[in-house]
Image (cartoon, grey):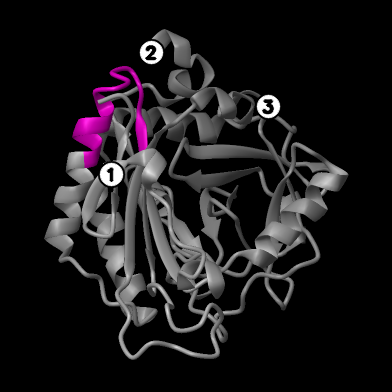
């Protein structure tokens, strides 16, 4: 095997051949749901949680998966097993992607065939932790762009989907101001929600505060964070968070799949705390490392030593 394999509409194919036609509804109208997990020691981490959320997203989107959840699990395990052989020292990310199917009647959305067969894709990629080394060493600068997050009255926050044009525009807006910044989206009432690839929480007065779950995609990493906090007797509560709360927090963090938990050290140009990755964040990363049996801090800051 000279290149990774992927799963495309019922077949395992070379990754370079894993493509969708231009008239697939995931491309034409963005009718697609997705999910993403990573490995630790090349073993899928929280796979069941991600699969369950993916299938719930499909149901909400009225996209009927062509295979069962058990079959999806077997596909993921085969991809990880096969593709990990190409890079024995790498951790892999795996993406689920399902669209409403191919519109062979009309290229747009004005005409639809009587029946649609969803397009189901799974593919992997090696996670390049060197991309995130500055996140752990210096922290993230979050900036709130003008575009607001999808209100749950229009699209449920509980599903992981590919309707993210507002996030793309927000990211381009932020990058023009600070090429290294991460956009953090407000809702239509000015409350903090999430970034394009992570949740957002603040730490203050001995507790961690998350935006309310009806306004965000409650991530698997946020669930794990809650489990770790419970083991440390630190409350995780849900509340509305405004910019005022962020700049007055002791610490702020980004729970996310690739590197688990990143420190946010500045917000809209103002430092959070002393402007450095905080001690509580480091304690939690060390506890997280115990959970997964791998030094996450070293994985991100010195990946070559773990290769």
Residue 13 image label: 1
Rendered position, 75 above or below 193: above
Q: Residues within 10 Å of mark 1 (few under 14, many from 20)?
A: some
Mark 1 vs mark 3: give the one in front: 1
Asked if the residues shown at circle 1 and circle 2 are in contact, with their CB atoms under 8 angstroms apart, the answer is no
Image quadrant containing the N terminus: top left
Mark 3 vs 2, N-terminal side: 3
Q: Residues within 10 Å of mark 3 (few under 14, many from 20)?
A: some
Outermost residue to the right: 177
Q: Secondary structure at mark 3?
A: helix
Span shown in magenta: 79-93
From the viewer's side, name the closer residue of 205 and 307.
307
Q: Secondary structure at mark 2?
A: helix
Mark 1 vs 3, N-terminal side: 1
Q: Residue at x 33, y 91 (%)?
A: 114
Image quadrant containing the C terminus: top left
Q: Residue at x 38, y 13 (%)?
A: 306
> Distance from label 1 to label 3 (Cα)?
40 Å
Mark 1 vs 2, N-terminal side: 1
Q: Residues within 10 Å of mark 2 (few under 14, many from 20)?
A: few
Query: Is residue 23 shown to the viewer in this render?
Result: yes
Residue 306 image label: 2
Is 85 magenta? The answer is: yes
Rendered position, 79 above or below 72: above
Q: Secondary structure at mark 1?
A: strand
Residue 126 shown left or right of residue 178 in the figure: left
Task: Report x, y in % for residue 115.
Answer: 30, 86
Is 274 magenta? The answer is: no
Query: Is residue 41 shown to the viewer in this render?
Result: no
Q: Which residue is mark 3?
A: 138
Task: Report x, y in % for residue 230.
Answer: 34, 49
């Amino acid at each position: 095997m000279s290149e990774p394999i992927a799963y495309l509409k019922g077949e395992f194919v070379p990754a370079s051949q894993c493509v969708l036609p231009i008239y697939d509804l995931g491309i034409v109208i963005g009718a697609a749901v997705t999910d993403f997990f990573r490995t630790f020691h090349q073993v899928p981490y929280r796979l069941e949680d991600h699969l369950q959320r993916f299938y719930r997203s499909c149901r909400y989107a009225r996209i009927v998966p062509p295979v069962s959840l058990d079959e999806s699990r077997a596909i993921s395990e085969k991809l990880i097993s096969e593709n990990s052989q190409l890079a024995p020292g790498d951790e892999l990310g795996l993406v689920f992607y399902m669209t409403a199917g191919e519109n062979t009647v009309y290229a747009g959305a004005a005409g639809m065939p009587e029946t649609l067969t969803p397009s189901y894709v799974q593919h992997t990629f090696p996670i390049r932790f060197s991309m995130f080394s500055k996140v752990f060493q210096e922290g993230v600068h979050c900036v709130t762009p003008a575009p607001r997050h999808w209100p749950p009255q229009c699209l449920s926050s509980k599903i992981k989907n590919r309707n993210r044009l507002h996030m793309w525009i927000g990211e381009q807006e932020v990058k023009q101001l600070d090429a290294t910044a991460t956009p953090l989206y407000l809702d239509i009432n000015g409350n903090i929600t999430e970034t394009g690839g992570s949740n957002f929480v603040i730490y203050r007065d001995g507790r961690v505060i998350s935006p309310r779950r009806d306004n965000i995609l409650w991530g698997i990493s946020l669930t794990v964070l809650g489990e770790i906090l419970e083991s440390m007797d630190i409350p995780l509560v849900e509340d509305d968070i405004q910019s005022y709360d962020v700049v007055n927090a002791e610490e702020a963090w980004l729970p996310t799949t690739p590197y688990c938990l990143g420190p946010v050290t500045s917000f809209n140009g103002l430092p959070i705390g002393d402007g450095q990755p905080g001690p509580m964040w480091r304690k939690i990363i060390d506890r997280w490392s115990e959970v997964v049996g791998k030094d996450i801090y070293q994985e991100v800051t010195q990946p070559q030593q773990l290769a």
